Image: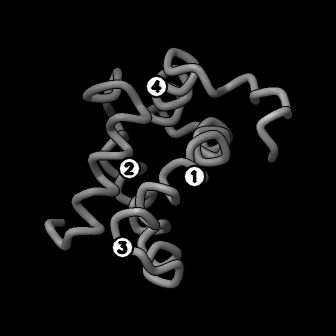
Amino acid sequence: MTMTDAASPATRDDDLDALLVRAATGDCEAFVAFYDATAPRVYAVLLSLTGLAEKADALLEGIYVEAWERMRGRSAPPCPGMQWMSAIAHRHATGRI
């Protein structure tokens, strides 16, 4: 994606949070859409924290597994979705999981 490409419809915080709320009810498609909208930014956070593409790649999946498990049964994310994912990424990258 380049800076001139249009943003996907699910990039606003409200849209991301709505996807997480749907995912909490078991909606896998909503979680996939959330992943697609946020994974590049979460990966960038991981890469900046670890400095290693291999480590960022290895951590990315675990972060989304944790998010899926923690969101189940919630009515809303604990904070805005992207902020929440960044916090999980920081914990994983620094080994404080």
Q: Nearer the viewer, residue 71 or 5?
A: 5
Q: Which mark is residue 39?
A: 1
Q: Amino acid at mark 2?
A: Ala
Nearer the camera: disc 4 or disc 3: 3
Please indicate whether residue 31 sits to the left or right of residue 2 in the image. left
Question: Which quadrant, please, contains the C terminus?
Answer: bottom left
**On residue 50, which mark appears?**
3
Residue 94, horizontal then vertical, whole percent:
21, 69
Q: Quick one: label 4, few (<14), some, or many (20+) residues within 10 Å?
A: many
Q: CA distance from mark 4 to mark 1?
A: 18 Å
Q: Is residue 49 above or below residue 17?
A: below
Task: Tell me the quarter of the picture where residue 82 sits.
Answer: top left
User: What separation in Å lies between label 3 and label 1 (alpha carbons)?
Assistant: 16 Å
**Which circle, 4 or 1, is nearer the viewer?**
1
Image point (38%, 45%), residue name: 85
State which mark lies toward you, 3 or 1: 3
Q: Residues within 10 Å of mark 3 (few under 14, many from 20)?
A: some
Structural distance between the alpha carbons of marks 1 and 2:
12 Å
Q: Upstream in the sequence, badge 4 or badge 3?
A: 4
**Mark toward the start of the polypeptide (1 vs 2):** 1
* Residue linked to disc 2: 67
- Badge 3 vs badge 1, beta-carbon distance below 8 Å: no
